[in-house]
Image: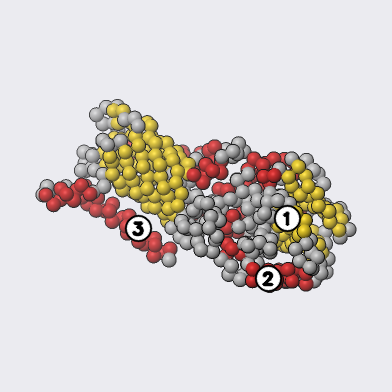
Amino acid sequence: MLKQWSFKIVLITVLPILAARVETFSQVSQNPDSATYKILLPDYVKMQFAGGIGFLSVGVGYTFFNQKLDVTYFYGYVPKFVASDDLHSVSLQLTAKLLQLKVNKNIELMPLNIGWFIHHTFGSDYWIKLPEHYPEGYYWWSPGRNSGVFLGGEVKTKLLSNKTPASGTAFYVRAGSRGLYMASKFGNSSIPLNDIIEFGFGVAVYR
Amino acid sequence: MSMRTTLKALLLIGILINTSCGDLFDYSPYAIDFNDENRNVNQKNIERLLNCKNDDTITIAFTGDTHRFYDETELFVSEVNKIHSVDFVIHVGDIADFGLPKQYLWGNSFMQKLSFPYFVVIGNHDLVGNGLLAYEEMFGTLNFSFIYNQIKFIFVNTNSREFKFNGEVPNIQWLDAQLQPAIDFNLVVVIFHVPPTDDDFDASLEEAFHNTLARYNNVLFAVHGHLHHHEIYKPYTDSITYVNVFGVEHKKYNMIKIINNQFDVETMEF
């Protein structure tokens, strides 16, 4: 069951990325058809380490409002050797870049990003709707889907831009927490704050 | 900044972060990555207990249903540590609230500060998500027992609902085999999370469960949690006493003393 799922997830995730890469790196000639197709192409691909959504996550997404908002769809994988169990998950991450500082013509600094994410882990243990063997309202949360918030920063550079069609490469960090952790910390001074923080960092290649 | 320098810098940062503060990075709320001191805890404590000197009184402090009451759990631990006559501590289940590995670590971080051996039986909240795996990695098998001072302590998983009432929880055959009289014990104390009278207990096994407890006429008392309040009662005509022990949020706990094949239940406040 999980194997089938993971194959599908890999397929769903990898195909758009490949499509995006082929498109960005091959500089398809401008004709009306490819122009409309290009609108649907993701604006960037991201690869993230940790951050609670996978050991390694790959994502595609779009920017809105002059690159002030990123909407990224990630597939994250946690291998058994770091977690006792293989874990597959997807997440949707919204990042708002509140400050955009142009350092020079090559470097842009975004020191204050805030974001929200919703994270879904695959597998029958991680249900979203309370299974039938429980009475209504027995557990109030869903192990399969939970959300959280984060703070972060980003440096956008022109890296890769002179040798490839990519417009630039950004490096970002993020520190967040999810609702289930915040609920655990709430009212408990005995739980250290950094215990509920999920750190992560990643790289984004813009087209 | 050339690509080469950037990659080198990234590699360096990666190595620094991973070696200095690897715990900061979370891969998933369901990633189980327990260190050695958070593994096989019940068995290690059995060995610890059997190395302790004992007198003719067994004093056991009970807590349970600690869920997200971490401050209260910390307080409980520091209070119990003041009472030197305690032989060991039993947690009657629900050490995690959402079944998260991180909650197992938090719960156990306080229990580890106990000056005495301690044992944790599995509760229904501990089984949500991949909590079963987390319990097995941290505490060991779901059903276990040990003998201390000629008294056998049997810990049994009674969270039938979490196993979809599959007819195998609680494991009656295992329980029966454990209760069968042997030369190394003469009395038994049975510890579980969900009491047999509860809706979360498999109704089709309720009768078999209390018949089994009564079969060899050697059960001194049974202890459970799940309901958070305290009560001493006899739910069946077999006259076995059940002790429902306080959930930690009441800032109360129950101390049970066993002496001369008799037992006495006290409530302690903190």
Can residue B91 be seen by looking at this rendering?
yes
Q: Is residue B60 left or right of residue A185?
A: right
Say above or below: A34 vs B21. below
Mark 3, other Cα within 10 Å: few <14 / some 14–19 / many ≥20: some
Q: Is residue B102 left or right of residue B62?
A: left
Callout 2 secondary element? helix
Mark 2, other Cα within 10 Å: few <14 / some 14–19 / many ≥20: many
Q: Are marks 2 and 3 on the same chain?
A: no
**Comparing labels 3 and 1, the label whose residue is closer to the camera:** 1
Residue B172: assigned label: 2
Which chain is home to disc 2? Answer: B
To which quarter of the image does residue A162 belong? top left
User: Which residue position holds label 3?
Assistant: A10
**Comparing labels 2 and 3, the label whose residue is closer to the camera:** 2
Nearer to us in this view, B197 or A119: B197
Q: Amino acid at mark 1?
A: Asn
Say above or below: B115 vs B123. above
